Image (tube, helix red, strand yellow):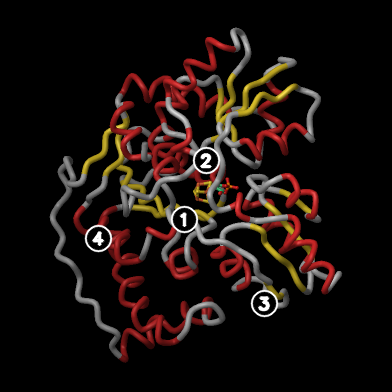
């Protein structure tokens, strides 16, 4: 079953046209004129190492139109670290990992949130700030982890492990979150698991994140069989081979990677944790074992570091473009809503995580 089918079956509703009263706005003219080129030049300087001049001719009018529309609509764009650089650096108002974006979604007083990320992130924003209009530029931007488990699966786990608390990674549908005790992200999974005061915890749905957390805690972790289709492709062998050629290369991995990849890494952390590590340590050469756009985004800010492949593309994150961000704001389409009964229970699980003391 695809994520969209799961969502439709389990209660999160999706709208392809705007049900609320927003004034119609005409699609702006998009032309790369000499005046526009001059006006946008300071912004181009921030991304010139990762966006070519030809690409900029296409991006600049879209960037200008989106930034003007954000003001008209009182909208903010929450951009995940895996967005391409022209989205991340040129239209993103808040940028970060899943945890940071969830917190910003709860804080904003904008009327509209455009989620430059995937569907579960948009649902989390809705849970954090239910009165806001949440738009996702492409409804099909899913996640293999979110698609790996249903609410019914979680109910079956509850029956199979009576009394064992269930922690769900935020990479799940609202319907799955509604069946769980608390959510976690890759930034706080160990802390969340240990906060429950239980000797056994179910940590779903990412089997590799669960394995990673198990190496950091004495709590017994019971895992599900979900995997991130992007991170599961990396191998320890390819990384060890790279290091064999040049031992000055630093290897930084996301905890969704397989255990042999994490064993080969110098540091493992959430996407924010990985970025902070690079900015603090400024290694001459680094491999970010994660989605490719993150290297491009950090390299625009840390030009002294050389970013080495491998990296893999997330096909879901790559569905988001300047073009569909603009269309979502012009037509106010692709609103993400959640059935109130599901939302109330899912919100409890997310708020319990957000309210944990550091
Ligand atoms: P982060 O919370 O680390 O940003 O991870 C989200 C994600 O989808 C990674 O694949
Ligand atoms: Fe999901 Fe993996 Fe894509 Fe993140 S990178 S959104 S976990 S499929």
Marks 4/1: CA–CA distance = 16 Å
Which one is earlier in the sequence, the residue at label 2 or at label 1? Answer: 1
Q: Nearer the viewer, mark 2 or mark 3?
A: 3
Marks 2/3: CA–CA distance = 29 Å
Which one is earlier in the sequence, the residue at label 1 or at label 3? Answer: 1
Question: For this view, does 222 lie left or right of residue 245?
Answer: left
Question: For this view, does 200 lie left or right of residue 56?
Answer: right
The quarter of the picture where residue 322 lies is: bottom left
Q: Nearer the viewer, residue 319 or 49?
A: 319
Say few, some or many: other residues with alpha carbon within 10 Å of mark 1 (under 14 / 14 to 19 / 20 or more): many
Say few, some or many: other residues with alpha carbon within 10 Å of mark 4 (under 14 / 14 to 19 / 20 or more): some
Number of callouts in the render? 4
The residue under label 3 is 303
Residue in the picture at 36% in, 78% down: 60
The numbered disc on residue 327 is 4
Q: Nearer the viewer, mark 4 or mark 2?
A: 4
Which one is earlier in the sequence, the residue at label 4 or at label 2? Answer: 2
Q: In the picture shown, does residue 185 fall above or below 312? A: above
The residue under label 2 is 103
Q: Please say if the residues under marks 2 and 3 sit with CB atoms less than 8 Å apart.
A: no
The residue under label 1 is 79
The numbered disc on residue 290 is none
Marks 2/1: CA–CA distance = 13 Å
């Amino acid at each position: 079953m695809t994520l969209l089918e799961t969502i439709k079956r389990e209660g999160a509703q999706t709208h392809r046209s705007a049900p609320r009263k927003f004034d119609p706005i005409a699609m702006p003219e998009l032309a790369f004129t000499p005046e526009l080129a001059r006006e946008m030049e300071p912004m181009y300087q921030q991304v010139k190492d990762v966006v070519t001049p030809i690409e900029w001719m296409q991006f600049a009018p879209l960037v200008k139109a989106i930034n003007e529309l954000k003001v008209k609509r009182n909208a903010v764009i929450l951009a995940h670290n895996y967005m391409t650089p022209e989205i991340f650096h040129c239209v993103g108002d808040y940028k970060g990992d899943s945890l940071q974006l969830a917190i910003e979604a709860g804080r904003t007083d904008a009327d509209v949130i455009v989620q430059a990320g995937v569907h579960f992130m948009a649902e989390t924003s809705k849970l954090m700030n239910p009165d806001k209009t949440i738009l996702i530029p492409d409804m099909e931007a899913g996640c293999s982890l979110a698609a790996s488990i249903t609410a019914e699966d979680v109910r079956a786990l509850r029956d199979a492990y009576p009394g064992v608390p269930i922690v769900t990674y935020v990479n799940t549908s609202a319907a799955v979150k509604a069946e769980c005790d608390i959510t976690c992200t890759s930034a706080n999974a160990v802390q969340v698991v240990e906060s429950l005061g239980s000797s056994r915890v179910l940590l779903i749905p990412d089997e590799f994140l669960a394995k990673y957390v198990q190496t950091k805690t004495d709590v017994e972790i019971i895992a599900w069989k979900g995997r991130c289709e992007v991170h599961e492709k990396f191998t320890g062998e390819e990384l060890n081979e790279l290091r064999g050629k040049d031992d000055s290369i630093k290897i930084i991995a996301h905890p969704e990677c397989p255990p042999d990849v994490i064993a080969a890494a110098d540091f493992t952390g959430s996407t924010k944790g990985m970025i902070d590590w690079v900015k603090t340590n400024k290694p001459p050469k680094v491999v970010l074992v994660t989605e490719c756009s993150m290297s491009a985004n950090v390299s625009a800010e840390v030009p002294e570091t050389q970013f080495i492949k491998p990296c893999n593309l997330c096909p879901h994150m790559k569905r988001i473009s300047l073009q569909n961000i603009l269309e979502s704001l012009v037509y106010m389409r692709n609103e993400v809503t959640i059935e109130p009964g599901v939302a109330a229970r899912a919100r409890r699980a997310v708020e319990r995580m957000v309210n944990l003391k550091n």
